[in-house]
Image: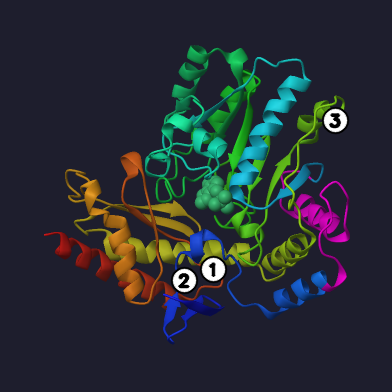
Amino acid sequence: MLISSSSGVWLQTADGRQILDAGGGAIVTNIGHGRPEIAQVASQALERLDYVVPVFATEARVALAEEVSDNWLPDPSWRSVFVSGGSESVDAAIRVAQLHHVACGRSERHKVIGRDVSYHGATLGALSAGLHDRRRKGLEQALLSMPKTSHYDAEELEKVIELEGPDTISAFIGEPVIGAAAGAYVPPDDYWPRISEICARHNILVIADEVMTGFGRLGTTMGHEALKFTPDIIAAGKGLGGGYVPIGGVYCRPDVVAPIAETDLALMFYTFAGHDLCCAVAKKVLEIVREENLIDRARTMGDILRGRLEQEFQDHPNVEEVRGRGLLQGLGLVADRDTGEPFPRSAGFADAVSGIALENGVWVYPSGSGVFDDAVMFGPPFIVEEDQIDQMVTTTRHAIDEAVAALS
Ligand SMILES: Cc1ncc(COP(=O)(O)O)c(C=O)c1O
């Protein structure tokens, strides 16, 4: 399939078909496709400046850092470093945590605790910190060994810390709502506050991987707000550039980076980190989200989407659960809802559902791994309308039924 243009919530193929972007690409296109003012900002940025090595400031870099700290981070004093995507932001966040402890004279703190169902990106470091079994397959031996704890039981973290030795751990990393690995799984209400408490007691930095949940997606400014905790470091990407440019970032409290600045240690930059064009566009994307009240809209349309999914699938024999927060919603797909029996992995069920939905004009994001194997996710642009929500839900139901029929 050749995609030739995009506008609003729609992708157009070269042969004239329209595809409803219910997955927002890979949960990326927060403000929707084809905004002409973004193209204008991009063109002006390139006329002004092209490549500038990341150690120099540029107007667009400074402006984006101010936009983010003034409007999106837990406190305006937080510091930002921009990178080119989510995996890079996670790798950089892990490096910041490690350098922080080394700068504080605790070089024995080198381990990062991740979770038993999680996805943090495709670099070797990010794959090691996460546990998405399908995406690690064939690479396990090349990955670093990093301890894992439960995605739902915060108390297990205490046991893992004891086992590993608190003095060996630099950071804990987790997604506020688990995206690709679990199809929008939301942990119990007390999970994140309890994780924060345990980490603070052991001087372990909490890294929130907000690559998918950041910048309004959950109907709150950042995802950690919806889950009622404040991390020490945030890694984020995707919605920051809204799909118009590849950009991510690492954000942290000033006291996390201050000790590093007092040593000869440094966070090595990626060559294209904070590209001026990407920063200029990302700033415009965030302004649009704020000025058009799109966070409120993500919350309102998220509620409507959730209601429609519950109505359509509450008795469906192959939907175990409707889950998610804001405009990040998912369906857990199983062979038998009553017993919870999964589809055989060889069936590639979520991919089959997504393929059939696509043939019928809707892109839904196939996801899931481990105990959450087989899920689909909805993460449309925040500008989505009610009739489009209806179309994505109806088409997905048809796709699930057809995929089940094809199996039997
Ligand atoms: C939570 C999370 N972290 C990190 C990543 C990696 O981001 P990227 O694919 O932009 O490198 C993803 C991508 O899906 C993600 O969902």
Return the residue nearer the eye: 62 or 227.
62
Secondary structure at numbered mark 2: loop
Residue 276 seen by the camera: yes
Provide the residue designation for mark 1: 381
Provide the residue designation for mark 2: 21
In the image, is residue 248 part of the stretch drawn in magenta?
Answer: no
At horizontal 22% and vertical 46% (from top left) the residue drawn is 342
Badge 3, how many Cα within 10 Å: few under 14, some, many 20+?
Answer: some
User: Is residue 71 rendered to the left or right of residue 376?
Assistant: right
Quarter the C terminus occupies: bottom left
Kind of residue sitting beneath label 3: Ala
Return the residue nearer the eye: 31 or 195.
31
Check if mark 2's residue and mark 1's residue have beta carbons within 8 Å.
yes
Q: Position of residue 270 (x, y in %)?
A: 72, 46
Secondary structure at numbered mark 3: helix
Return the residue nearer the eye: 175 or 135.
135
Span highlighted in magenta in the image: 47-75
* Gap between marks 3 and 2 measured at Cα: 44 Å
Secondary structure at numbered mark 1: loop
At horizontal 64% and vertical 67% (from top left) the residue drawn is 244
Provide the residue designation for mark 3: 261
